[in-house]
Image: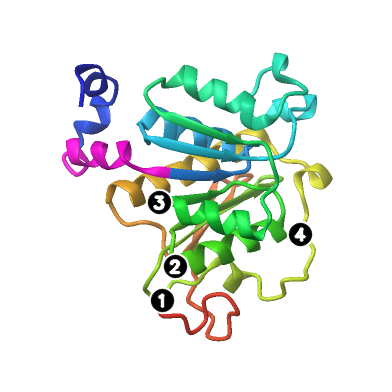
Amino acid sequence: MTDDELLRYSRQILLPEFDIEGQERLRQAHALIIGMGGLGSPVAMYLAAAGVGRLSLVDDDQVDLSNLQRQIAHRTADIGRFKVESAGDTLRALNPLIEVTTLPMRLNDAELRERVGEADVVVDACDNLATRLAINAACVQAGVPLVSGAAIRLEGQVLVWQPGGEGGCYRCLYRESEMDAETCAQTGVLAPVVGIIGSIQALEAIKILSGLGEPLVGRLLLLDAARMEWRSVRVRRWPDCPVCGGCEI
Protein backbone atom coordinates (compact mmCIF):
# COMPACT_ATOMS: atom_id res chain seq x y z
CA MET A 1 0.00 0.00 0.00
CA THR A 2 1.43 3.38 -1.02
CA ASP A 3 1.90 6.41 1.22
CA ASP A 4 -0.90 8.17 -0.65
CA GLU A 5 -3.25 5.26 0.02
CA LEU A 6 -2.30 5.15 3.69
CA LEU A 7 -3.06 8.86 4.00
CA ARG A 8 -6.28 8.70 1.96
CA TYR A 9 -7.72 5.86 4.05
CA SER A 10 -6.02 6.76 7.33
CA ARG A 11 -9.18 7.53 9.30
CA GLN A 12 -10.64 4.06 8.81
CA ILE A 13 -7.26 2.32 9.08
CA LEU A 14 -7.02 3.87 12.56
CA LEU A 15 -9.96 1.73 13.66
CA PRO A 16 -8.36 -1.20 15.53
CA GLU A 17 -11.03 -3.64 14.32
CA PHE A 18 -10.39 -2.57 10.71
CA ASP A 19 -6.66 -1.71 10.44
CA ILE A 20 -4.53 -2.17 7.31
CA GLU A 21 -5.79 -5.73 6.87
CA GLY A 22 -9.35 -4.50 6.42
CA GLN A 23 -8.22 -1.86 3.97
CA GLU A 24 -6.30 -4.43 1.96
CA ARG A 25 -9.40 -6.63 1.79
CA LEU A 26 -11.36 -3.69 0.38
CA ARG A 27 -8.58 -2.97 -2.09
CA GLN A 28 -8.84 -6.53 -3.45
CA ALA A 29 -12.64 -6.62 -3.49
CA HIS A 30 -15.19 -6.33 -6.29
CA ALA A 31 -18.65 -4.89 -5.63
CA LEU A 32 -21.47 -5.09 -8.16
CA ILE A 33 -24.01 -2.25 -7.77
CA ILE A 34 -27.27 -2.63 -9.66
CA GLY A 35 -29.14 0.66 -9.97
CA MET A 36 -27.48 4.06 -10.07
CA GLY A 37 -30.30 6.22 -8.78
CA GLY A 38 -31.16 7.51 -5.32
CA LEU A 39 -29.79 4.47 -3.48
CA GLY A 40 -26.99 3.55 -5.85
CA SER A 41 -25.51 7.06 -5.81
CA PRO A 42 -24.51 7.14 -2.11
CA VAL A 43 -23.64 3.43 -2.17
CA ALA A 44 -21.20 3.87 -5.04
CA MET A 45 -19.71 7.10 -3.71
CA TYR A 46 -19.04 5.69 -0.25
CA LEU A 47 -17.61 2.43 -1.58
CA ALA A 48 -15.36 4.38 -3.94
CA ALA A 49 -14.24 6.76 -1.20
CA ALA A 50 -13.57 3.84 1.17
CA GLY A 51 -11.27 2.19 -1.38
CA VAL A 52 -13.18 -0.82 -2.70
CA GLY A 53 -10.83 -1.80 -5.51
CA ARG A 54 -13.32 -2.56 -8.25
CA LEU A 55 -16.86 -1.29 -8.73
CA SER A 56 -19.19 -2.50 -11.48
CA LEU A 57 -22.20 -0.24 -12.11
CA VAL A 58 -25.31 -1.51 -13.89
CA ASP A 59 -28.23 0.67 -15.04
CA ASP A 60 -29.85 1.20 -18.44
CA ASP A 61 -31.52 4.48 -17.47
CA GLN A 62 -30.50 8.03 -18.39
CA VAL A 63 -30.26 11.07 -16.13
CA ASP A 64 -33.46 13.11 -16.01
CA LEU A 65 -34.13 16.48 -14.39
CA SER A 66 -36.45 14.84 -11.86
CA ASN A 67 -33.59 12.59 -10.68
CA LEU A 68 -31.41 15.44 -9.44
CA GLN A 69 -33.44 16.01 -6.26
CA ARG A 70 -31.95 12.85 -4.73
CA GLN A 71 -29.51 11.09 -7.10
CA ILE A 72 -26.37 12.83 -5.91
CA ALA A 73 -23.88 11.11 -8.24
CA HIS A 74 -25.29 13.14 -11.16
CA ARG A 75 -25.20 16.85 -12.06
CA THR A 76 -27.41 19.12 -14.15
CA ALA A 77 -24.91 18.90 -17.02
CA ASP A 78 -25.38 15.08 -17.01
CA ILE A 79 -29.04 15.21 -18.08
CA GLY A 80 -29.48 12.84 -21.02
CA ARG A 81 -26.37 10.77 -20.24
CA PHE A 82 -26.48 7.19 -19.07
CA LYS A 83 -26.50 7.16 -15.29
CA VAL A 84 -23.64 4.68 -15.09
CA GLU A 85 -21.43 6.94 -17.25
CA SER A 86 -22.27 10.01 -15.19
CA ALA A 87 -21.71 8.15 -11.93
CA GLY A 88 -18.52 6.59 -13.27
CA ASP A 89 -17.05 10.05 -13.87
CA THR A 90 -18.05 11.10 -10.35
CA LEU A 91 -16.40 8.04 -8.78
CA ARG A 92 -13.18 8.34 -10.76
CA ALA A 93 -12.90 12.00 -9.76
CA LEU A 94 -13.55 11.04 -6.14
CA ASN A 95 -10.97 8.25 -6.10
CA PRO A 96 -8.71 7.67 -9.12
CA LEU A 97 -7.11 4.66 -7.41
CA ILE A 98 -10.09 2.35 -8.01
CA GLU A 99 -11.36 0.60 -11.13
CA VAL A 100 -14.87 1.45 -12.30
CA THR A 101 -16.71 -0.63 -14.92
CA THR A 102 -19.93 0.79 -16.37
CA LEU A 103 -22.67 -1.32 -17.93
CA PRO A 104 -25.42 0.87 -19.48
CA MET A 105 -27.77 -2.05 -20.01
CA ARG A 106 -30.48 -4.19 -18.48
CA LEU A 107 -29.00 -7.60 -17.74
CA ASN A 108 -30.88 -10.70 -18.84
CA ASP A 109 -30.94 -13.74 -16.56
CA ALA A 110 -27.76 -15.27 -17.97
CA GLU A 111 -25.86 -11.97 -17.89
CA LEU A 112 -27.06 -11.31 -14.34
CA ARG A 113 -25.83 -14.70 -13.16
CA GLU A 114 -22.48 -14.13 -14.85
CA ARG A 115 -21.94 -10.68 -13.32
CA VAL A 116 -23.08 -11.79 -9.87
CA GLY A 117 -20.69 -14.75 -9.99
CA GLU A 118 -17.75 -12.39 -10.59
CA ALA A 119 -18.50 -10.20 -7.55
CA ASP A 120 -17.59 -10.46 -3.87
CA VAL A 121 -20.76 -8.61 -2.86
CA VAL A 122 -23.84 -7.41 -4.73
CA VAL A 123 -25.71 -4.26 -3.77
CA ASP A 124 -29.31 -4.12 -4.95
CA ALA A 125 -30.13 -0.43 -5.42
CA CYS A 126 -32.85 -0.84 -8.03
CA ASP A 127 -36.38 0.53 -7.85
CA ASN A 128 -38.68 -2.35 -8.75
CA LEU A 129 -39.66 -5.63 -7.11
CA ALA A 130 -39.22 -7.90 -10.13
CA THR A 131 -35.57 -6.88 -10.53
CA ARG A 132 -34.93 -7.24 -6.79
CA LEU A 133 -36.28 -10.78 -6.85
CA ALA A 134 -34.15 -11.66 -9.89
CA ILE A 135 -31.01 -10.26 -8.21
CA ASN A 136 -31.83 -12.15 -5.03
CA ALA A 137 -32.25 -15.43 -6.91
CA ALA A 138 -28.95 -14.95 -8.76
CA CYS A 139 -27.08 -14.21 -5.52
CA VAL A 140 -28.52 -17.21 -3.69
CA GLN A 141 -27.72 -19.48 -6.63
CA ALA A 142 -24.13 -18.18 -6.82
CA GLY A 143 -23.61 -17.99 -3.05
CA VAL A 144 -22.66 -14.30 -3.24
CA PRO A 145 -23.65 -11.94 -0.37
CA LEU A 146 -26.44 -9.49 -1.17
CA VAL A 147 -27.22 -6.11 0.39
CA SER A 148 -30.74 -5.11 -0.59
CA GLY A 149 -32.33 -1.74 0.09
CA ALA A 150 -35.51 0.13 -0.74
CA ALA A 151 -36.91 3.57 0.03
CA ILE A 152 -40.19 5.32 -0.68
CA ARG A 153 -42.00 8.34 0.74
CA LEU A 154 -40.50 8.68 4.26
CA GLU A 155 -39.76 4.99 4.72
CA GLY A 156 -36.83 2.71 4.01
CA GLN A 157 -35.52 -0.79 4.61
CA VAL A 158 -32.30 -2.80 4.38
CA LEU A 159 -31.81 -6.58 4.37
CA VAL A 160 -28.57 -8.55 4.04
CA TRP A 161 -28.35 -12.15 2.82
CA GLN A 162 -25.22 -14.26 3.19
CA PRO A 163 -24.58 -17.92 2.40
CA GLY A 164 -25.14 -20.23 5.35
CA GLY A 165 -27.18 -19.70 8.46
CA GLU A 166 -30.90 -19.37 8.90
CA GLY A 167 -31.35 -15.80 7.66
CA GLY A 168 -34.07 -15.47 5.04
CA CYS A 169 -33.52 -14.05 1.57
CA TYR A 170 -35.50 -11.26 -0.11
CA ARG A 171 -37.89 -13.80 -1.60
CA CYS A 172 -38.74 -14.97 1.91
CA LEU A 173 -40.11 -11.47 2.55
CA TYR A 174 -42.18 -11.34 -0.62
CA ARG A 175 -43.86 -14.71 -0.83
CA GLU A 176 -46.34 -13.51 -3.43
CA SER A 177 -43.91 -12.75 -6.25
CA GLU A 178 -46.69 -11.44 -8.50
CA MET A 179 -47.62 -8.61 -6.14
CA ASP A 180 -47.27 -5.03 -7.36
CA ALA A 181 -44.89 -2.69 -5.57
CA GLU A 182 -45.18 1.09 -5.47
CA THR A 183 -42.40 3.22 -6.93
CA CYS A 184 -41.04 6.67 -6.11
CA ALA A 185 -42.36 7.93 -9.45
CA GLN A 186 -45.86 7.08 -8.25
CA THR A 187 -45.75 8.15 -4.60
CA GLY A 188 -42.62 10.30 -4.15
CA VAL A 189 -39.68 10.13 -1.77
CA LEU A 190 -37.87 12.66 0.40
CA ALA A 191 -34.27 13.04 -0.77
CA PRO A 192 -32.37 12.34 2.49
CA VAL A 193 -34.28 9.07 3.00
CA VAL A 194 -32.53 7.41 0.06
CA GLY A 195 -29.25 8.87 1.32
CA ILE A 196 -29.73 7.27 4.73
CA ILE A 197 -30.67 3.86 3.31
CA GLY A 198 -27.93 3.96 0.67
CA SER A 199 -25.34 4.84 3.32
CA ILE A 200 -26.41 1.84 5.40
CA GLN A 201 -26.15 -0.38 2.34
CA ALA A 202 -22.61 0.89 1.75
CA LEU A 203 -21.72 0.24 5.39
CA GLU A 204 -23.04 -3.31 5.24
CA ALA A 205 -21.13 -3.99 2.02
CA ILE A 206 -17.92 -2.71 3.62
CA LYS A 207 -18.51 -4.90 6.68
CA ILE A 208 -18.98 -7.97 4.49
CA LEU A 209 -15.90 -7.26 2.38
CA SER A 210 -13.60 -6.35 5.26
CA GLY A 211 -14.85 -8.78 7.90
CA LEU A 212 -15.75 -5.89 10.20
CA GLY A 213 -18.46 -6.28 12.81
CA GLU A 214 -21.68 -8.24 12.37
CA PRO A 215 -23.60 -7.76 9.10
CA LEU A 216 -27.35 -7.25 9.11
CA VAL A 217 -28.02 -10.88 8.21
CA GLY A 218 -31.47 -12.28 8.95
CA ARG A 219 -32.71 -8.90 10.21
CA LEU A 220 -34.84 -6.44 8.26
CA LEU A 221 -33.96 -2.90 9.33
CA LEU A 222 -36.92 -0.53 8.90
CA LEU A 223 -36.85 3.28 8.97
CA ASP A 224 -39.82 5.56 9.65
CA ALA A 225 -38.20 8.90 8.88
CA ALA A 226 -41.32 10.91 9.74
CA ARG A 227 -40.86 9.87 13.38
CA MET A 228 -37.15 9.03 13.01
CA GLU A 229 -37.81 5.59 14.44
CA TRP A 230 -35.97 2.37 13.62
CA ARG A 231 -37.23 -1.18 13.92
CA SER A 232 -35.41 -4.46 13.39
CA VAL A 233 -37.44 -7.52 12.41
CA ARG A 234 -36.10 -11.07 12.31
CA VAL A 235 -36.29 -12.69 8.88
CA ARG A 236 -35.82 -16.43 9.08
CA ARG A 237 -35.59 -18.69 6.08
CA TRP A 238 -39.01 -19.67 4.74
CA PRO A 239 -38.88 -23.48 4.42
CA ASP A 240 -40.98 -23.38 1.23
CA CYS A 241 -39.06 -20.49 -0.35
CA PRO A 242 -38.50 -21.38 -4.04
CA VAL A 243 -35.12 -19.60 -3.91
CA CYS A 244 -33.42 -20.45 -0.61
CA GLY A 245 -35.77 -22.89 1.11
CA GLY A 246 -34.00 -26.14 1.88
CA CYS A 247 -30.76 -25.04 0.23
CA GLU A 248 -27.47 -26.00 1.84
CA ILE A 249 -25.48 -22.96 0.64
Figure quadrant of the C terminus = bottom left
Between marks 3 and 2 in the image, the one whose residue lies nearer the viewer: 3
Give, as a three-letter code, the residue at label 4: Ala
Secondary structure mostly taken by the magenta-highlighted segment of the chain: helix
The three-letter amino acid code for the residue at tag 2 is: Gly
Residue 146 vs residue 27, the one in the foreground: 27
> Considering only vertical position in the picture, is 134 above or below 205?
below
Of all residues, the one furthest to the left in this rendering is 16
| Picture quarter with the N terminus | top left
Which mark is first along the chain, 1 or 3? 3
Q: Amino acid at mark 1?
A: Glu
Task: Identify which residue is drawn at 54% across, 21% down.
Answer: 90
According to the picture, the residue beneath numbered tag 4 turns out to be 181
In this picture, residue 55 sits left or right of residue 138: left
CA–CA distance in space, label 3 to label 2: 19 Å
Left or right of 201 on screen, residue 135: right
- Circle 2 — which element? loop
| First along the sequence among labels 4 and 1 | 1
Query: Residue 145 location, x and y as percent?
Result: 43, 58
Q: In terms of sequence position, does the residue under pointer 1 or pointer 2 come before the other?
A: 1
- Residue depicted at x 40% and y 68%: 163
Q: Which residues are magenta?
A: 16-30
Residue type, numbered disc 3:
Asp
